[in-house]
């Protein structure tokens, strides 16, 4: 790339409230078209909207988490435009006086720290949905009208597609830790528009920007920005001028295409929403919300290292998602062995979640049951390998690990006389390997262990097997 890429992101976060932003209609997804509606969210004459207080609290939470200034006084505005999926002909949003402003998000690209400043975070409602794939006509579903959103607008501080992706992932992590949204890009809970321009390295003036929409994954954000940057570079190198416009990302063709000329603020004819009173946030209210904020990933990672004495890598993996970190801590309360718990959560638990494509809240083994399983391993009742077998059975059963071990006869054999008897048989049948060991080829020791474990169907206590074998071979 012969030019510097300048990127600013506009992110829409759909909040997980049970009701809409300005009325009592449900926000439940997947119901029949045009059933989650009322005169208020359809903008019928004579109706009066009322701000959902949970929406306001969510905005303040995100503002505090991203180091924003929280406005003690802000107002809602009408953003006027005409489109089939906007029955009112306007969208309730914020313009001149947003609830949050001048914050920042810290993130990493590799080991390099980065920061993107935020211009604003503001409250707005979603529009409806146009449906184009039913026959030749276009249909409109108004269920989404009025669903609460937060729009997070960054300064043009981002300088590469990778930075944009990492910023977005960090923002999603903050949103999920706060519990205000599921942050699912594929389902539209988190939507990203990218403003992209090019300028010569060292220049202060920004180039003409285009806005790219329709990116529904972190990978598509990277690819769309990369394509658009090279498209603009080709135009500039050929002596042309980049046109300010909105473009759509086509994930199938891996290209952007023109959608419409870019609107300016005056095109929307913003004016204060006359049916909603100004929003006031007292210092006491802000302080109450501040005190209820969760422990964020960086602080939790540091605490995990110090409190549980686990490696930095483990702590980093376990704190990526709040629910995984919670699951780990609940497991440790039962098992009392933080390193073993860490290994199992990062290994068996995360592997299962990935294979089944589920979240931890859908996982069938509660932390109490996993902790009980780890206790059985810890006290030698079953071996680690047997533990993995029990774990697999627990996935499809509500039984406790203790009852599974008893039913399946999986208890570990620690009877030294029984193990010694099997070891004697193995050594007697393996005179050639015994001679190799005695001549200094100690790598055959694993052969004896394997044969013993095989003979005892994996139930022998590995430590006792090792101790008995060493004693007899050296004798």
Image: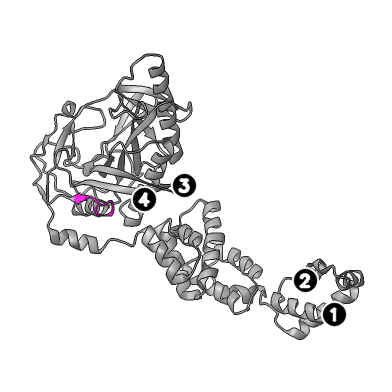
Quarter of the image for residue 207 reads: top left
Residue at horizontal 23 percent and vertical 50 percent from the top: 68
- How far across and down, in percent of the image, does residue 83 sit? 24, 27
Q: Quadrant of the N terminus?
A: top left
Dots 2 and 3: beta carbons under 8 Å?
Answer: no
Q: Distance between the residues labelled 2 and 3?
A: 43 Å
- Local packing at callout 2 (Cα closer than 10 Å; few below 14, some 14-19, many 20+) is some
Sequence-first disc among 4 and 1: 4
- Local packing at callout 3 (Cα closer than 10 Å; few below 14, some 14-19, many 20+) is few
- How far across and down, in percent of the image, does residue 197 sit? 34, 28
The numbered mark at residue 182 is 4
The front one of 359 and 94 is 94
Residue receiving disc 2 = 449
Magenta span contains residue 118: no
- Farthest front residue? 202
Residue at horizontal 81 percent and vertical 78 percent from the top: 422
Q: Distance between the residues labelled 4 and 3?
A: 25 Å
The front one of 391 and 58 is 58
**Numbered range of the magenta stretch:** 64-69
Q: Quadrant of the C terminus?
A: bottom right
Element at label 2 = helix
Residue at horizontal 18 percent and vertical 54 percent from the top: 53
Sequence-first disc among 2 and 3: 3
- Residue 186 appearing in the image: no
- Farthest top residue? 239
**Is 69 rendered above or below residue 443?**
above
Residue receiving disc 1 = 424
Residue receiving disc 3 = 110
């Amino acid at each position: 790339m012969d030019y510097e890429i300048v990127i600013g992101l506009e992110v829409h976060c759909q909040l997980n409230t049970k009701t809409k932003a300005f009325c009592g209609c449900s926000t439940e997804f997947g119901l029949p078209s045009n059933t989650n509606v009322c005169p208020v969210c359809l903008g019928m004459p004579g109706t009066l909207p009322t701000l959902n207080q949970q929406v306001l609290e969510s905005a303040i939470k995100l503002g505090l988490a991203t180091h924003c200034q929280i406005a003690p006084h802000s107002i809602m505005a009408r953003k006027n435009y005409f489109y089939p999926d906007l029955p009112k002909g306007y969208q309730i949003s914020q313009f001149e006086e947003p609830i949050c402003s001048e914050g920042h998000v810290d993130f990493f690209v590799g080991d390099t720290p980065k920061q993107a400043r935020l211009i604003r975070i503001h409250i707005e409602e979603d529009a409806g949905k146009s449906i184009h794939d039913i026959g030749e006509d276009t249909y409109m579903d108004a269920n989404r009208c009025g669903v609460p959103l937060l729009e997070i607008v960054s300064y043009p501080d981002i300088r590469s597609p990778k930075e944009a992706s990492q910023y977005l992932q960090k923002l999603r992590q903050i949103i999920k830790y706060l519990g205000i949204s599921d942050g699912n890009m594929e389902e539209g809970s988190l939507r990203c528009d990218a403003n992209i321009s090019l300028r010569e390295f060292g220049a202060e003036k920004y180039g003409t920007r285009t806005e790219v929409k329709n990116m529904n994954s972190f990978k598509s954000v990277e690819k769309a920005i990369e394509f658009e940057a090279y498209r603009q570079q080709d135009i500039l190198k050929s002596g042309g001028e980049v046109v300010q416009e909105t473009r759509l990302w086509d994930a199938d063709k891996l290209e952007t295409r023109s959608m419409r000329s870019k609107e300016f603020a005056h095109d929307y004819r913003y004016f204060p929403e006359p049916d909603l009173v100004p929003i006031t946030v007292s210092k006491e209210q802000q302080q109450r919300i501040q005190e209820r904020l969760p422990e964020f990933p960086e602080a939790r990672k540091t605490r995990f290292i110090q409190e549980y004495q686990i490696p930095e890598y483990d702590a980093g993996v376990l704190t990526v998602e709040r629910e995984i970190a919670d699951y780990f801590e609940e497991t440790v309360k039962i098992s009392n062995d933080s390193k073993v718990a860490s290994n199992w959560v990062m290994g068996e638990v995360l592997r299962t979640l990935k294979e089944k494509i589920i979240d931890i809240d859908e996982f069938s083994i509660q932390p109490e049951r996993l902790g009980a399983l780890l206790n059985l391993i810890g006290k030698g009742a079953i071996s680690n390998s047997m533990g993995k077998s029990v774990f697999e059975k627990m996935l499809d059963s509500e039984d406790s690990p203790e009852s599974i071990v008893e039913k399946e006869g999986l208890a570990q054999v620690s009877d030294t006389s029984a193990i010694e008897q099997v070891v004697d048989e193995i050594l007697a049948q393996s005179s050639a390997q015994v001679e190799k060991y005695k001549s200094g080829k100690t790598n055959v020791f694993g052969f004896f262990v394997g044969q013993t474990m095989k003979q005892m169907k994996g139930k022998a206590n590995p430590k006792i097997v090792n101790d008995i074998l060493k004693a007899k071979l050296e004798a």
